[in-house]
Amino acid sequence: MVAEIEEGLELTLDFTKLDAVAAVGQAVVPVVLQHADTGDVLFVGYANREALAATLDERRAVLWSTSRNELWRKGETSGDVLELVDLRVNCEQNSVLYRVRPVTAGVCHTSGATGEARPTCYYRQLVSLDELAFVDGLA
């Protein structure tokens, strides 16, 4: 099932994600992770107060894993560390932006055709409400 979600071309958006996050009771805000040099959005995660403090202190992306309910230091196991350039807060103070610089070429936990981690988690585009297509060079 995970492989089909991550590599398939059928749209199966998880519209229950925020319900699941809320059900755990962990106070978090959404985090957009953006490549500081290219402006590309790398992925979206979540942070609690502890993750924000660790991110500022360590100058690398630290998030709250909503699936494992623990701090997640991006790259701790994969080596795909994201160094913090700056951290911004939106106008309503209900989301944050981590402007980061990848230490390696990989960002996503999925691999492309070369077997290396993809440089963004947004490697497919929406063709219709039923179909996805790989973005050129990211398959």
Image (cartoon, rainbow, N blue to C red):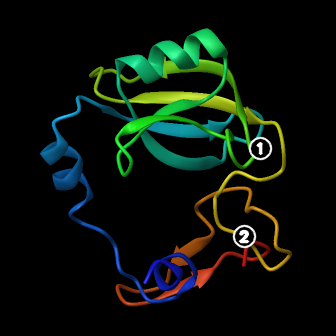
Residue that label 1 marks? 79
Q: Closest to the observer: 112 or 71?
A: 71
Give coordinates of residue 132: x percent, y percent: 51, 84
| Res. 111 mark | 2
Looking at the picture, how far across and down is residue 103, in whole percent? 82, 37
Q: Whole-Å distance between the Cαs marked 2 and 1? A: 14 Å
Query: Residue 30: horizontal and vertical position, in percent?
Result: 36, 37
Q: Secondary structure at mark 2?
A: loop
Q: Nearer the viewer, mark 2 or mark 1?
A: 1
Mark 1 closeness class: few <14, some 14–19, many ≥20 residues within 10 Å:
few
Q: Is residue 12 above or below residue 41?
A: below
Q: Is residue 62 left or right of residue 95?
A: right
> At 56% from the left edge and 39% from the top edge, which residue is drawn?
33
Query: Which amino acid type is shown beneath numbered disc 2?
Result: Ser
Looking at the figure, which quarter contains the N terminus?
A: bottom left
Whether 58 is drawn above or below 19: the answer is above
